[in-house]
Amino acid sequence: MNVSDQPAELLSLLRWYQAMGVDVAVGEVARDRFAESAAPPTRTLKPKPTPTQAEPARTSAASAAPTLTAPDLDEVEKLVQACGTMEALRAAYDAYDGCPLKPRATQLVFADGNPEADIMLIGEAPGHDEDLQGKPFVGRAGQLLDRMLGAIGLDREKVFIVNTVAWRPPGNRNPSPAEIESCRPFLNRQVQLAAPKLIVSLGLVATQTLFAEKISITRTRGQWRDVSFGGFAAPVLPTLHPAFLLRQPRQKREAWQDLLTLKAAMTALDGGESG
Ligand code: URA
């Protein structure tokens, strides 16, 4: 049976892919790998000539895949330093092609909340809902985050929220170190321009990114550490990621302690006035 002639079969195949976590297309043209593996093997008898400028290399579906050339981070640093406002930085990030995640994502997920706020939250990476809406933390984890913030009198007008990378990793995998590094100049500049007084890192990946070392989130959470963001220093409080708390609700007790630690620091900032 040719499945493409059967809409119901096609739909159930798509649903099965989705249930298996295959929820993004990685190429414009579908490849029939069954047909490829059934075809007799082809052998190249002659070494392929090296393409010259007069005879450019032919492109194929495979060679049209996103290139992973590492960006020149010194150049990227100059680019971000030239951005004097958050809007200029957003435009530069949107135009930036140095992050390998960009070609497969729907759009840039730059930030949400108030860039003037004293408190900044740094998450890991956009997920499915964030990719569609272009805003961080709008899915289930984001709803839990809103409730956590609400419990200590915060909302999105009182915090500024970003991620270590601004494009969704396919299938919600963790961003790789190379993907994170390609976005780090933008993250640093987001922090420099927002100039928050306190920063909360959400989960292992964000905390490892900021501390620039391998850590255990269960041992590191709840303790402030000063971090430099390309020259701008701010205290960072690691806590558990809301997506982790959705899977491990018993850990909410630890997250609550971290929220109280944050609340105490906010009160100290206000000279003991905030309740
Ligand atoms: N998880 C994150 O770390 N960031 C988001 O924006 C959404 C989910």
Image (spheres, rainbow, N blue to C red):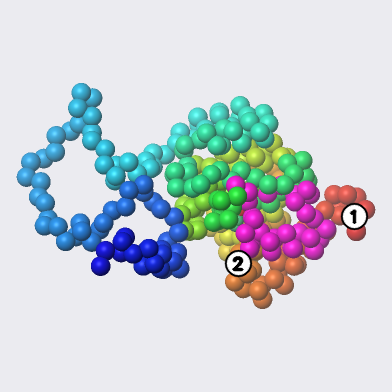
Residue drawn at point x = 18 percent, y = 33 percent: 50
Query: On the image, which quarter does residue 194 sit in?
Result: top right
Q: Does residue 165 appear to the left or right of 72 in the view shown?
A: right
Question: Real-space Cα distance between discs 1 and 2?
Answer: 30 Å
Q: Is mark 2 within 8 Å of ligand 1?
A: no
Considering only order in the chain, which callout, 2 or 1, is on the residue closer to the N terminus? 2
Q: Position of residue 183 (x, y in %)?
A: 53, 42
In the image, residue 194 sits, relative to residue 266, either above or below, namely above
Q: What residue would you read off at disc 1?
A: 274
Q: What residue would you read off at disc 2?
A: 244
SS of the residue at dot 2? helix
- Looking at the picture, tell me which residue is in the foreground, 107 or 233: 107
Q: Position of residue 223 (x, y in %)?
A: 70, 60
SS of the residue at dot 1? loop
Q: Does residue 185 appear to the left or right of 53 in the view shown?
A: right
Query: On the image, which quarter does residue 265 sit in?
Result: bottom right
Q: Amino acid at mark 2?
A: Phe
The stretch in magenta equals 134-161
Q: Does the magenta-highlighted stretch encompass residue 154?
A: yes
Residue drawn at point x = 67 percent, y = 35 percent: 86
Q: Does the magenta-highlighted stretch encompass residue 88?
A: no
Q: Position of residue 113 (x, y in %)?
A: 72, 47
Q: Is mark 1 within 8 Å of ligand 1?
A: no
Q: Can residue 159 be seen from the camera position used here?
A: yes
Name the outermost residue toward the bottom.
250
Q: Can residue 198 be seen from the camera position used here?
A: no
Name the outermost residue toward the top.
54
Residue drawn at point x = 63 percent, y = 31 percent: 88
Q: Amino acid at mark 1?
A: Ser
Neighbours of disc 1 within 10 Å: few (<14), some (14-19), many (20+)? few
- Looking at the picture, tell me which residue is in the foreground, 90 or 240: 90
Neighbours of disc 2 within 10 Å: few (<14), some (14-19), many (20+)? some
